[in-house]
Amino acid sequence: MKRIALGAVAVVLLATVVPSAQTKAYKAPRTPDGQPDLQGFWTNSTYTPLERPDGVTKAFYTPEEAEAAIKRAVQRESAQTEPGTTADVHYDFSQFGLDRSQSLFVRNLRTSLIVDPANGKIPPLTEEGKRRTAQRDAEQKKLGGRWDSAESNQLDDRCLIMAGPGPPMMDAGYNSNYQIVQSAGAVMILTEMIHDVRIVTLDPSTSSGSPRAESRGDGRMLVDPRLRQWMGVSRGRWEGETLVVETTNFNGKNPFRGSDENLKVIERFTRVADDTIEYKFTIDDPTMWTRPWSAESAMKKTVGPIFEHACHEGNFGLYNTLVGARLEEKRAAEDALKKGSK
Amino acid sequence: MMRNRFLVVLIVAAVVSGVSLAVDRVTAQQAAVQSTAQAYRAPRTPDGKPNLNGIWQTMNTANWNIEAHPAGPSPVRDLGASGAVPAGLGIVEGGEIPYLPAARKKQQENYANRLKLDPEIKCYLPGVPRSTYQGMPFQIIQSTKHIMLIHEFAGAVRTIYMAEQTEAPADSWMGWSNGRWEGETLVVDTKGFNDLSWFDRAGNFHSDALHVVERFTPRSAETITYEATIEDPKVFSRPWKMSMPLYKHVERNAQILEFRCVEFVEDLLYGHLRKQPAK
């Protein structure tokens, strides 16, 4: 047991100290058309929270503190369900590797993924942001209680979209696996959860094979603001070793930590080692927040392949929950009637 | 030379099919399409393979019925002419699907109950080959080890393994695809299907024994000849084939857009389970 803990500490050191030294020395392999090669299967599973926990005042833990923080997170995760209960039968996170600790996950000495602002917290809302948040909450309330209808339920329980695909791409709780495939004009990112695919169209003036400077900003890179999508519309370009992706045209129905339809996400993917892609993103939504904010994480090489996640097709959970909720209401009404007649 | 090759293809096709004159004529036409395709050499990707990258779509009414069919009224009255069924020549080689007798009966039952049963109506993954001709565009992202087919409908996605090929780990809607190059042609062998998807809105169906072999052969800069051989001994008396051209989107801003149809069907699927307001 002690040896495992020591091993983990060694991994922490490797994962955090080495990449920064490697960034300069490492040059990613190339695709046949000369792009830095990001292809393969990756995971962004992590225990590092987006926001710095309350009471933590520094940006980095010591390796020992980081290990202790992971240990606490693992305990919280396994305590999600109580052995012997119905909930436990459905989702025992330690079974089937649903918990993160049984699979590969990204270790990090950071106390939060957010690196800017320096306090590791999402910046304050604007006045308009507060107004929209209140409006959104009121609209959700109008839909009724969570089990009143499919529409009043959560997006992930409805198999509409999960946390993985973003953008920005976040740890999805489990199955945080991705496949990247590159062709000359596009980078495809497949998210395991709900087989969500993002096709990043590369700016033809910067993608290899089409070095046409005059095509920058041409028709294919423009998107009409009336076209709105759950995952927005992503446009990419290579800046040296880094794939820079800008995404706009969100429909605002899948808010990221309270974002709205004016959200612009800028992501930077840099392969810094054979088994690591450094992943940085900036959230810019001037309607909602007083300033842009940024985070840093990583994707670790994992084993494929990715199997079809047909979520909606097998969504017995939502159906059965609604059936159960209506039955309970019926029973409660009958009980009330009986009491009344007595 | 060209004419001789055409004749040979014609004779071989006639011998193989060996049935009525009308069928031979159809086969001959398809053979003619193929001989053009074989003469075309596609541009190459940087790793030397025929370049299939792009956004593709079919131009036929096969999603209504893969067999030949007349025009008909909309299955949903309120949609009137806008929802009516356009006629189609069919994409099945030889004209008719060689169903086993019991299977033809099931197809007819499927058709009669299509509004309740067609998985497309429920926004379920379309299966193969329906995903190809369902009517919405799909993008081919071609790399050396993996070729991705990304469909607009329900965000259906297929990974074609060109290296590290394995058996299907379990049954799925879109199956498990292994690919190889035969000259100009991408050959995709797909197994591991569940028995839940259909071939079209007319109730044509398959079992979990389905085995599909597809052939993508570039026939010009902006067209591909698509052929699929369908094998399923639980449903059909023999393997059969469908074929159709794929057309490339040439608009400068062409892209696959989201068709996240789950939210469009929630009221249909779960509406009867909505909490009723207190009386």
Image: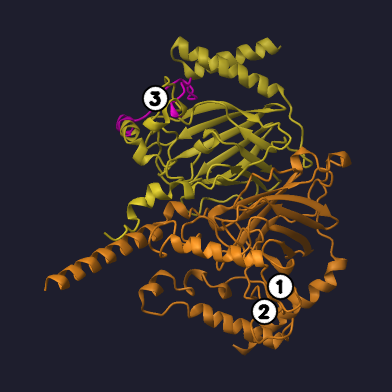
Q: Which amino acid type corresponds to the residue marked 1 in the rendered image?
A: Ile
Q: Is residue A176 visible?
A: no
The residue marked by circle 2 belongs to what chain?
A: A
Q: Nearer the viewer, residue A136 or A280?
A: A136
Q: Position of residue A229 (x, y in %)?
A: 61, 49
| Chain identity for the colour orange used in the image | A
In the rendered image, which residue does mark 1 sit on?
A114
The tint of chain B in the picture is yellow
**Label 1 neighbourhood size at 10 Å, few (<14), some (14-19), many (20+)?**
many
Q: In the displayed orientation, state which residue is furthest to the bottom.
A: A2
Q: Position of residue A119 (x, y in %)?
A: 73, 79
Q: Nearer the viewer, residue B71 or A190?
A: B71
Magenta stretch: helix, strand or loop mostly: loop
Please say if B33 is above or below A210.
Answer: above
The answer for how far apart the CA atoms under marks 3 and 1 are is: 57 Å
The range drawn in magenta is B83-106
- Contact between labelled residues 1 and 2, with CB atoms less than 8 Å apart: yes
